[in-house]
Image (cartoon, grey):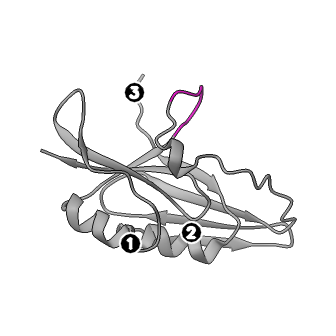
Amino acid sequence: MSGCLHHVSLTCRDLNASQRFYEQFGYTTLKSYTDEQVSIVIMTSDFGPAIEIFCFTSREYDHSPASRIDSMPNIQSIGITHIAIQVDDITATRRQLIKSAPCTEIRTARLGGFVYFFTHDPDENQIEIIMEN
């Protein structure tokens, strides 16, 4: 049996803000759906799995942040802790993102092969930005 990662699914508070964030990385809207309970957008890029974004109309979200910049990256919990987006120019990407969101310093991966930093999207999902060496 073989397989590959098809998509990552996120729930957000503000669909437009989330779309704008992921558009910075070359993601575009492939499909969208809205009814009285939810809006769903599938965003794709030429380089990786899709991102499926849900925004429920009930708005009864747990507003406690999933991650905070002062503890970022918080990758010691069980389950999915972050998603990683690969870029061509990590320094330029960090310079752009830090205008609107906190970012950690750029570091070299312990296993080698790439450099990275962490930031978060508008709903404070941890996002690792990586660039291969």
Report helix, strand or loop for mark 2: helix
Is residue 91 shown in magenta?
no
Quadrant position of the C terminus in the picture: top left
The residue that disc 3 covers is 2
Label 1 SS? loop
Question: Which amino acid, by three-letter code, is at mark 3?
Answer: Ser
The residue wearing badge 2 is 18
The reply, left or right, for residue 123 in relation to residue 20 is: right
| Viewer-nearest residue: 108 or 50 | 108
Instruction: Tell me if mark 1 has few (under 14), some (14-19) or many (20+) residues whose alpha carbon lies within 10 angstroms of its own.
Output: few
Span shown in magenta: 76-81
Comparing labels 3 and 1, the label whose residue is closer to the camera: 1
Where residue 55 appears, x then y in whole percent?
72, 65
Residue 105, numbered circle: none
**Above or below, comparing residue 97 to residue 8 in the picture:** below
Numbered tag placed on residue 24 in the rendering? 1
> Is the residue 50 above or below the residue 57 in the image?
above
Q: Position of residue 95 (x, y in %)?
A: 29, 69
From the viewer's perspective, tell me whether residue 58 is left or right of residue 75.
right
